Amino acid sequence: MPRRTATMLASTLILIALLCAGVFIKVPYSEMSPGPTVNTLGEHDGEPVLQISGRKTYPATGHLNMTTVRVTSADYNMNLVEAVYGWLAHDNKVVPHDTLYPDGKTEEQSTQENAEEFSESQESAKVAALKELDIPVKSWVIVSTVLKGSPAEGRLHAGDVIKAVDGTAVKAPEDVAKLVTEHKPGEKVVFTIVPAKEQAAAEKENRTATGAKDVTITTAKSDDGGTQRAIIGISAGTDHTFPFTIDIKLADVGGPSAGLMFSLGIVDKLTPGNLTGGKFVAGTGTIDDNGKVGPIGGIEMKTVGARQKGAEYFLTPKDNCAAAAKDTPAGLTLVKVDTIDDALNALKDIKSGNTAALPKCSAKG
């Protein structure tokens, strides 16, 4: 056999061997890719995404699309060939497996966590939208979760309303931790609560909850970093009562990143005219009760998915701007927003065609 032919044959066999090895070699990576984008002003699976009853609503045209990211499952074992292909592909992103599933988190645990975050983001989106429209919302601090084996287990329950700690009125979730940590481990702390069942009954009957009671709990020592901080083993959150019903119908979506777009959709449906002027606007970002927009993960995938769907403008959280601007899809304008007011002002400029005034993202932020 001629030397040149033998060399080509050997090279081919080595390449085949490497490809075969690559298929069987598993690597600790996962893949992210653009997911579905849904118009919050439209329908999904045959029903309106935003359903409002008990309050006058107005027709809205155009698009205010929330965006998503697809990720490989927790038990998916990516091989070396897939990883290399993902690194080279423009629309996909390969990341360490622990980035998506930290501390050995299972897919079931991740799904449950995402569902809880999605539910919380819907509540904040409603509150932010109604506050923007000066529509009163009743709010109170509640026990969000109780840690198993903690001093609070069996003493406090998820949904209990926290009225005061040691006689000091509680106005925000962060007040609870502050008041508890004024104690030393082993000291007693007194919670004044309205039990969850009584609060639920009061809401159903449209009355003020009664039956507040004191619960005394002995604090324990936090085990984080060897500190002597006092804890009782709960997390505090906020619950709300709305003056009318707002339902967000969107299955198979998780995480908190649709908050901004839901809040804008609610504002659009509750006000005459429309926010977009018929333009195609997409976006992302968490939102808190006060309308503050927060950063999210997978921004590059979301901008790609939005542009593929037809978006011309993308409302981008300020802290995601630098990453998004590194590889902006052609034809998509990235608009920097930090609050719901920023987003609404940007939509006014988009509607009027005054796009030169838009605060655009750059590689510097």
Image (cartoon, rainbow, N blue to C red):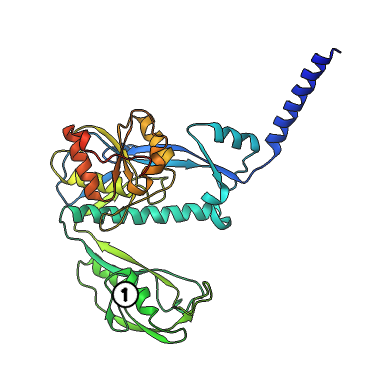
Tell me which corner region of the image, top left, top right, bottom left or bottom right, holds residue 5. top right
Q: Residues within 10 Å of mark 1 (few under 14, many from 20)?
A: many
* Number of residue marks: 1
What is the x, y in percent for residue 124? 29, 56
Give the residue drawn at x 26%, y 51%: 339
Identify the residue at the far right of this view: 1
Furthest residue toward top: 2
Report x, y in % for residue 280: 27, 33
Q: Residue 246 in the image: state x and y as whole percent.
A: 25, 51
Amino acid at dot 1: Ile
- Front-most of 359 and 293? 359
Query: Helix, strand, or loop for circle 1?
Result: strand
- The residue positioned 23% from the left and 38% from the top of the image is 358
The quadrant in which the N terminus is found is top right
Q: Which of the image's four quarters has the C terminus?
A: top left
Give the image location of residue 330, x and y in percent: 37, 28
- Residue 288 seen by the camera: yes
Towards the viewer: 212 or 204: 212
Q: Which residue is mark 1?
A: 162
Q: Is residue 318 left or right of residue 225?
A: left
Q: Is residue 61 visible?
A: no
For this orientation, the residue located farthest to the front is 364
Residue at screen point 41% across, 42% down: 323
* Closer to us: 207 or 177: 177
Which of the pair 318/18 is nearer the observer? Answer: 318
Q: Is residue 18 left or right of residue 304?
A: right
Seen in the picture, residue 281 relative to 292 is either above or below; the reply is: above
